[in-house]
Image (spheres, grey):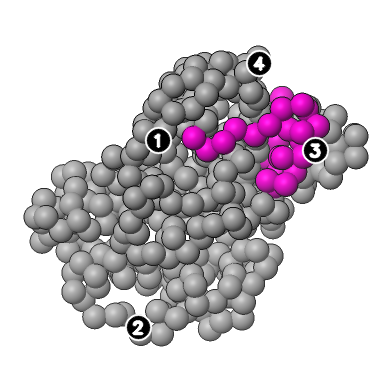
Amino acid sequence: MSPSELVLALEHARERTEALLEPLSDEQLTRQVSPLQSPLVWDLAHIGHFEELWLLRRVGGRRPVSPKFDDLYDSFAHPRGERGRLPLLSPEAARAYVGAVREAVLGLLPELSFNGGDPLLERGFVVGMVAQHELQHAETMAQTLALAGLPEQGPPEVRASGEVTVPAGPFTLGSTEPWAYDNERPAHVVDLPSFRIDRALVTNGEYAAFVEDGAAAPPGWDPAARPHAPVQHVSFDEAEAYVRWAGKRLPTEPEWEKAAKTVAGELEHLTGAVWQWTSSFFDGYPGFSAFPYAEYSEAFFGSDYRVLRGGSWFTDPLVARPTFRNWDLPQRRQIFSGLRCARDV
């Protein structure tokens, strides 16, 4: 990656953040709409703090802008439900902070060597991590705005139908891409039996029959408005209940990735519509090694979290790669999540 390409990645992420937040009032930025989500101004300053921590301090050797930010804007220091009561930066001060950090980063990048053997710098990994982190937080903020009842773009309509058979055999699960996260590594061969997977995501119209049969409706749901759009804001528990009701099952995480890598042309909306629940728990691949910090992935491994794949209508293409692993608690509905059915052959 050339320095100019790294700058473009950072600028692209910032443009998405600014476009999302620019129309909002200070009240909208500081209000906590749900204990599930941070106030938007926390996310904004956290984006700047993460960039400062990894690029200015860890890579550039700079002193902290403010030592108190290490507590205020640490994702693990305070649960989301508490963040609205913290002495956070005002919207104006948060914007000034993230702007000053970015200005310093742009001055630092030409001084760095991205092929000198440091794995943090190799091929611009740390810059890619910072850019992706901002894009992921932009989606988190979009979820907050949806919970606040503000209009959202929503996923594109479904046009495909039927199933695709994925043949039995080995494939490579995981990534060797330079900006892939630690939980996508190491790439390794997995052998799967044949299975069938739906070409299309489950639509509002299809889910309506499930709701009519007694299931709970997703929050803010109006199936009549967009019956052919994928259903979203569905939890894992609800997705699993739906596939059982439909006589199918959720794909496993390896099945989803194998389908994405081998029959992608036959599947509609692999990305760009809704995140798709899999039946798999979130855990490390064989030979996993945390890099560059354990809190990104390893802290969530185990039987509490389920994996989602693909990417929503808001997810940036830089993040929505076939190997990217998203995860959340099985009861969560605020994310832009839906489902694709699978079954045994």
Distance between mark 1 and mark 2 Cα atoms: 42 Å
Distance between mark 3 and mark 4 Cα atoms: 22 Å
Q: Which mark is residue 173?
A: 1
Identified by mark 4, the residue type is: Ser
Q: How crowded is mark 4: few (under 14 residues within 10 Å), some or many (20 or more)?
A: few
Q: State the image quarter where residue 184 is shown.
A: top left
Identified by mark 1, the residue type is: Leu
Q: What's drawn in magenta, residue-wise?
A: 226-254
Which residue is at a point 11% across and 51% down the rendered structure image? 115
Distance between mark 3 and mark 1 Cα atoms: 37 Å
Q: Residue 161 carries which label?
A: 4
Distance between mark 1 and mark 4 Cα atoms: 27 Å
At mark 3, the secondary structure is loop
Of the two numbered discs 2 and 4 in the rendering, the one whose residue sits closer to the viewer: 4
Q: Position of residue 174 (x, y in %)?
A: 38, 39
Of the two numbered discs 3 and 1 in the rendering, the one whose residue sits closer to the viewer: 1
**Residue position marked by numbered label 3 in the rendering:** 222
Q: Can residue 11 be seen in this view?
A: no
Of the two numbered discs 1 and 2 in the rendering, the one whose residue sits closer to the viewer: 1
Seen in the picture, residue 201 relative to 128 is either above or below; the reply is above
Q: Where is residue 56 in the image (x, y as percent from the top left)?
A: 24, 69
With 77 as the anchor, is 64 left or right in this view?
left
**Residue position marked by numbered label 2 in the rendering:** 66
Distance between mark 2 and mark 4 Cα atoms: 55 Å
Which residue is at a point 33% across and 45% down the rendered structure image? 186
With 128 as the anchor, is 319 left or right in this view?
right
- Residue sitting nearer the eye, 115 or 261: 261
